[in-house]
Image (tube, rainbow, N blue to C red):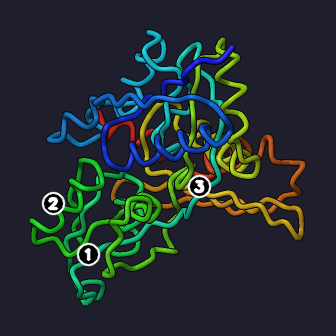
Amino acid sequence: MTKTIRIGTRDSELALWQAKTVEKSLNDLGYKTEIIAVKSQGDIILDKPLYELGITGIFTKTLDIAMINGQVDIAVHSMKDVPTALPKGIVQAAVLERATVLDIIVHKGNTNFLEKGATIATGSLRRQAQWLNKYPNHTVVDLRGNVNTRMQKLNDNDWNGAVFAAAGLERINLKPDSFINLDWMTPAPAQGAMVVLAMGNDNYTIDAVSQLNHIETEICTFIERQFLRTLEGGCTAPIGALAKYDQEDETIIFEGNLLSLDGKQKTEIKKIVPIEDWKKLGYHSAQEILNNGGKELMAEIKNQMK
């Protein structure tokens, strides 16, 4: 049996780049494909902060519905946008090899603002909290929209800079010369990775897509998302996590943190474990944070976001 695999994607430039990357890989393996672009709620409603929209799944819901309704066979996403609990019937078919995990700040050619008061733009609670933790005298403003829209807004406003994921800008050649790598900022769980979702009962598509899976990225993102899921319990919070595989020592190096919205409180963890202990690493790390003041902090965050 051969069928055309219909690839569902959001219609932003970055989302289409991701869909085309998956399409090319599938075509190289001999599969027929078609790209179907869909607008998501998260792209349409740009005047509300994400957390007011009930962030979980705002960018993925439209494609989930298209898949469940049989309009598309797979959905391609930035993995950090995908809720840790997938809708019933939908499965993770492949995680592609990860690009850079770095966050960067794009500025306007002048970095003096780092020493004094400044206005920084980001739509991410994690970036906001980590930025304020390091620069408590700065102001952070909300920034929404796809990558191109956010770049335009930075140019149109008198902000000193805006925080982006390096991977997104690099993928569509939008990364300017005026940026600084924020190597001190812990990335979002699964940042820099792309995931392909499919229907659990669609064996043909799952067999095709699973050939694109990158096992090291799959394991590291699993740990980070397990950490996120254990901490969050369905609430959006400033959570960073990064797992790296050290080939030489055959270990996983994990770091994770949870911050208050204003960045004043921060609980963090760093662990190095043998590779065979990866399956529960995210869970155990999150439990340690919860027992270390994290429970109270999460309750406070939930309260503030009501």
| Residue shown at the point (50%, 61%) measured from the top left | 266
| Residue shown at the point (62%, 24%) measured from the top left | 91
- Are dots 1 and 2 in contact, CB under 8 Å? no
Foreground tag (1 vs 2): 2
| Residue shown at the point (68%, 19%) measured from the top left | 204
Foreground tag (2 vs 3): 2
Tell me the amino acid under the disc marked 3.
Answer: Ala
- Quadrant location of the N terminus? top right
Is residue 286 or residue 48 the one in the foreground? 48
Q: Which residue is mark 3?
A: 241
Q: Earlier in the sequence, mark 1 or mark 2?
A: 1
Q: Earlier in the sequence, mark 2 or mark 3?
A: 2
Tell me the amino acid under the disc marked 2.
Answer: Lys
Q: Which residue is mark 2?
A: 153
Residue 37 percent location from the top left of the image: 34, 31
Q: Which mark is residue 262?
A: none
Residue 38 percent location from the top left of the image: 32, 28
| CA distance separating discs 2 and 3 | 28 Å
- Quadrant location of the C terminus? top left
Q: Circle 3 sits in a helix, a strand or a loop, which is it?
A: strand
Tell me the amino acid under the disc marked 1.
Answer: Asn
Question: Does any portion of residue 298 appear in the rendered image?
Answer: no
Question: Does any portion of residue 242 appear in the rendered image?
Answer: yes
Q: Which residue is mark 1?
A: 137
